[in-house]
Structure formats: C-alpha cells, structure tokens
Image: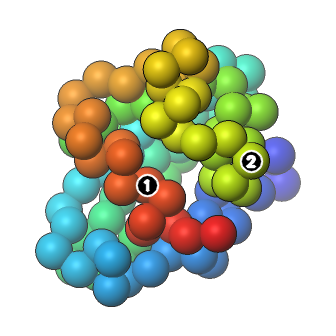
Amino acid sequence: MSEAKAVFDSMLGRFDADEADDMEAVFQFDLDDADNYHLSVEDGKCEMGEGEHDDPTVTLSMDLETLKDVMSGELDGMQAFMQGKIRADGDIMLATKLTQIFPQ
C-alpha cells in the first residue's frame, strides 16, 4: 500500500459522521509527490477514491509530508495555508473543517 493511501485510510477510520452530518462535499487532494485522492462526504458517510474527481467542492494541493503533519495535528492547517504549504481552490471554508470531520 502506498504511503499516501495509508494516510487516507487512517482518515477514513477517524471519520466523524456527527460532524459531517449535513455536509455534502468532495475534497480533492492533489499531492505533489504522491498519487491523487479524493474523499466524498455525503449522508454522513465518507468514501475514498483514487485520482481526480470530476467536480470537487474544494481542491487542496500540497506534498505528502504536509498532509501527514496536518492530519496528525503536528501542523495547523490554517498556518500551513498561510505559509503557502497548502494551496486551495474552490470552497476554502470547507477545507477548514477537515480536522473536525477527521479528528485526531
């Protein structure tokens, strides 16, 4: 299993359906140094897909290390965004909810 897939698998395991209750969104992750993945959240469920989604709600571009640091809580996502480590396109406010939907 790729390192990137392992990160997304662990995110799926931490998915908080209560936090994502009314959410309907597709998070596209474009990783500079790994395969791209997307997470679709709908009806309190989350599904992972490989590659590009046709119509993502928000696209987040970063390297794998940044993704791991943000999802492990070592790096604040907003701080990483301000430092230019994460580039976002689309519904940027949605991106701020990632750590609530996938808590540590």
Q: Position of residue 47 (x, y in %)?
A: 43, 66
**Is mark 1 in CB contact (under 8 Å) with mark 2?**
no
Q: In the displayed structure, would residue 82 be above or below residue 9?
A: above
Q: Position of residue 8 (x, y in %)?
A: 63, 56
- Crowd tier of the residue under label 1, counting other residues whose Cα lies within 10 Å: few below 14, some 14–19, many 20 or above: some
Q: Nearer the viewer, mark 1 or mark 2?
A: 2
Q: What is the count of numbered marks?
A: 2
For the point 42% across and 67% down, the residue is 101
Label drawn at residue 87? none
Q: Secondary structure at mark 2?
A: loop
- Quarter assignment of residue 100: bottom left
- Quarter assignment of residue 103: bottom right
Amino acid under disc 1: Leu
* Mark pair 1, 2: CA separation: 14 Å
Residue at which label 2 appears: 74
Q: Give the camera-side residue of 77 and 50.
A: 77
Q: Secondary structure at mark 1?
A: helix
Q: Earlier in the sequence, mark 1 or mark 2?
A: 2
For the point 82% across and 46% down, the residue is 3
For the point 45% across and 46% down, the residue is 38
Give the quarter of the figure containing the C terminus: bottom right
Q: Is residue 69 visible?
A: yes
**Side of 10 relative to 101 (left or right):** right
Q: In the displayed structure, would residue 83 be above or below residue 16?
A: above
Q: Position of residue 50 (x, y in %)?
A: 53, 46
Residue at which label 1 appears: 98
For the point 73% across and 21% down, the residue is 33
